[in-house]
Image: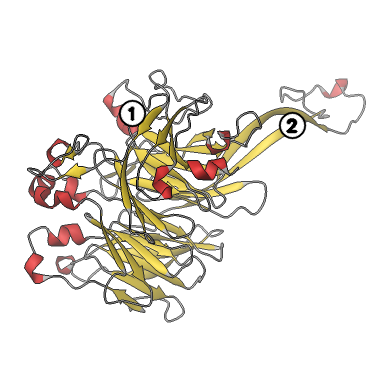
Amino acid sequence: MYYYYVPTTTSITIHCPGCSDFAEGLLIIAPPPPPPPGEYSRKPGSISLENNFRWIEMFADIISTVEFNHTGELLATGDKGGRVVIFQREPESKGEPFSQGEYNVYSTFQSHEPEFDYLKSLEIEEKINKIRWLPQQNAAHFLLSTNDKTIKLWKVGERDKRPEGYNLKDEGGRIKDMSTVTSLQVPVLMPMDLMVEVSPRRVFANAHTYHVNSISVNSDYETYMSADDLRINLWHLDITDRSFNIVDIKPANMEDLTEVITAAEFHPHHCNLFVYSSSKGTLRLCDMREAALCDKHSKLFEEPEDPSARSFFSEIISSVSDVKFSHSGRYLLTRDYLTAKVWDLNMESKPLETYQVHDYLRSKLCSLYENDCIFDKFECAWNGSDSVIMTGAYNNFFRMFDRNTKRDVTLEASRESSKPRAVLKPRRVCAAGGKRRKDDISVDSLDFTKKILHTAWHPTENIIAIAATNNLYIFQDKLNSEMH
């Protein structure tokens, strides 16, 4: 069951005998060769942000967040250089029926610049921590982007007409000599080449003492929240000079600090509910109707620790790095260092499902602690029907788990395998000293510098975006594309 599709980007058919359908027909749209040093590639199908001119420039190109908009037609990425790149999905053409899965560069802009806090002698990075789209209300699109301290609201719109025939200005914008104006004329709109305009509409600053790790738009589409290590603030999208503190876990004495907030998200349907996770591995569901300051949670989701399995690393690997509500609002998906868990909002005592992402690393925790990899924060994602979950791993691997069939697959996003008509097979990692098959990879040969931390899933279709350091990979379900 192969098909080969070679548009402006390279395509690979993934063959997974015995795996579920979501893994059997994935198509990777791999990036072409990198652009010249110091440039962004704007050619159709170019989705690589790679720059090898200098290490610092390459570091700035590392993708730090990925997010689809509510329709899936736009995909935004943020990087460590403070830039946001927006990709637009190509419409289906009769000559190329499978081209509708391609995403090409739509707009690029600088969202944040490096700053310096002179009061605290602290350098503020320009790295984009999170991007969140607002639901589209008119022809323009709006998105929120944040670095460690400042959140910005951006408007993304198109312009294909320009006014001409001003009475007081010439075409260059210069003021005319009034003695030459002999008659009045009505300015007219003339067609022009399509131009994408991005402009800042709001700047929400000076509200966070600690680093912002999450932003989430409320289902009322008027408010959003931002979370840092110790506090969560509620903002109105039209008010920039004040916010309401809805969670504050900072102790009176910082020596008594035992946990920090790691992620937060609003319920997709109930505007009064939100959840936040902590470094202790707990989830707290809060209801803003109960109190202005949600010091007391409505529900606490926590899995009892097995005393026999406790070790020096237990608290570190139990820290929740990401939490996501399902589209239905019934479940929560969390990711800690070794596992992904699905929680039912009606069952607080233990997770409904637990998936081992890379349990083979349990014997490597000492070395992972020494090289700081144990503190990596992996994200997770639901598919549109909440039946499949996805999360990243090391060696540019990412994992998919089918909740219905209990099948899972490990796939790799890499430039080395991006050859025309290549067949990308599922990968398998075996523990050190274990029996290996021909294509198996030993845990000792994993590259821990290649990690997939950021992933996103199209809201309605089986199209996923994978950020592998400074490359963006788009995967499309083959069966899904054949239906269009």
* Residue count near mark 2 (Cα–Cα under 10 Å), binned few <14, some 14–19, many ≥20: few
Task: Answer whether residue 443 is visible to the viewer in this image.
Answer: yes
Give the camera-side residue of 428 and 238: 428
Label ID, residue 162: 2
111 left or right, relative to 431? right
Amino acid bearing label 1: Ser
Q: Position of residue 408 (x, y in %)?
A: 32, 52
Residue sitting at x 36%, y 48%: 19
Residue sitting at x 44%, y 60%: 386
Q: Quadrant of residue 245?
A: bottom left
Quadrant in the picture for the N terminus: top left
Q: Is residue 403 above or below residue 200?
A: below
Label ID, residue 101: none
**Residue placed farthest to the right in the image?**
183
Which callout, 1 or 2, points at the residue further toward the start of the chain? 2
Q: Quadrant of residue 247?
A: bottom left
Residue sitting at x 13%, y 42%: 371
Residue sitting at x 40%, y 30%: 49
Circles 1 and 2, Cβ within 8 Å, touching? The answer is no
Task: Answer whether residue 146 is visible to the viewer in this image.
Answer: no
* Residue count near mark 1 (Cα–Cα under 10 Å), binned few <14, some 14–19, many ≥20: few
**Residue placed farthest to the bottom in the image?**
290
* Helix, strand or loop under label 2: strand
102 left or right, relative to 427? right
Q: Quadrant of residue 178?
A: top right
Amino acid bearing label 2: Arg
**Residue placed farthest to the top in the image?**
36
Give the camera-side residue of 481 and 31: 481
* Helix, strand or loop under label 1: loop
Residue located beneath label 1 in the image: 417
